[in-house]
Amino acid sequence: MAAKPQTYANHVKVVPAYHYFTFALVAIYFVYRLYLLITAPSLPNGMGVVAATALLMIMFWARLFALRVQDRVIRLEMQMRVAGLAPDLGPRFGEFTTNQLCALRFASDAEFPELARKVLSEKLDDRTAIKKMVRNWQADDARA
């Protein structure tokens, strides 16, 4: 069966095993360790809370680091698109924010130059607002 075409409404990437199952397990473990510390204060139970907190932070930072790397790749990809599709914007590439570039990547090649100019001239920086302006959605199925 063919995959459902990507649109603004369904473009958010959710990995259920990570976002729901693994996070839920770590959150439950944190609450359990906190409960143990409150009901029976001790050094081992305190260290359990520290370990559970570290696990939560590892999950958070691992996701954040992956998204930051993805943003850097998007920036490079968009620099190449600007050079090829809107060379007049090349000298202004540094004016684009990460939010703008991450939203503009969904614009088709045909509408990209006009939308990029509009985003720069109106100083639009809201990812959601820019994505909603895209008329011909270009799917990004390789995101993290």
Image (cartoon, rainbow, N blue to C red):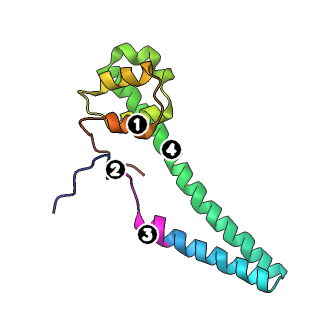
Q: Which mark is residue 11?
A: 2
Could you say where residue 103 lies in the image, as x and y percent from the top left? 40, 37
How far apart are labels 1 and 3 at the CA level? 29 Å
First in sequence: mark 1 vs mark 3: 3
Nearer to the camera, 76 or 7: 7
Q: Which mark is residue 129?
A: 1
- In this figure, which residue is indicated by the disc labeled 4? 69
Could you say where residue 107 lies in the image, as x and y percent from the top left? 30, 34
Rendered residue at 34%/38% (across/down): 132
Rendered residue at 84%/79% (across/down): 43
With respect to residue 95, does 65 lie above or below? below
Tell me the mark number nearer the camera, choosing from 1 and 4.
1
Q: Give the dominant element type of the magenta stretch: helix, strand or loop.
A: helix
- In this figure, which residue is indicated by the disc labeled 3? 17
Residue 109 shown left or right of residue 29 in the figure: left
How far apart are labels 2 and 4 at the CA level? 19 Å
Kind of residue at disc 4:
Val
Residue 4 shown left or right of residue 76 in the figure: left
Rendered residue at 35%/49% (across/down): 142
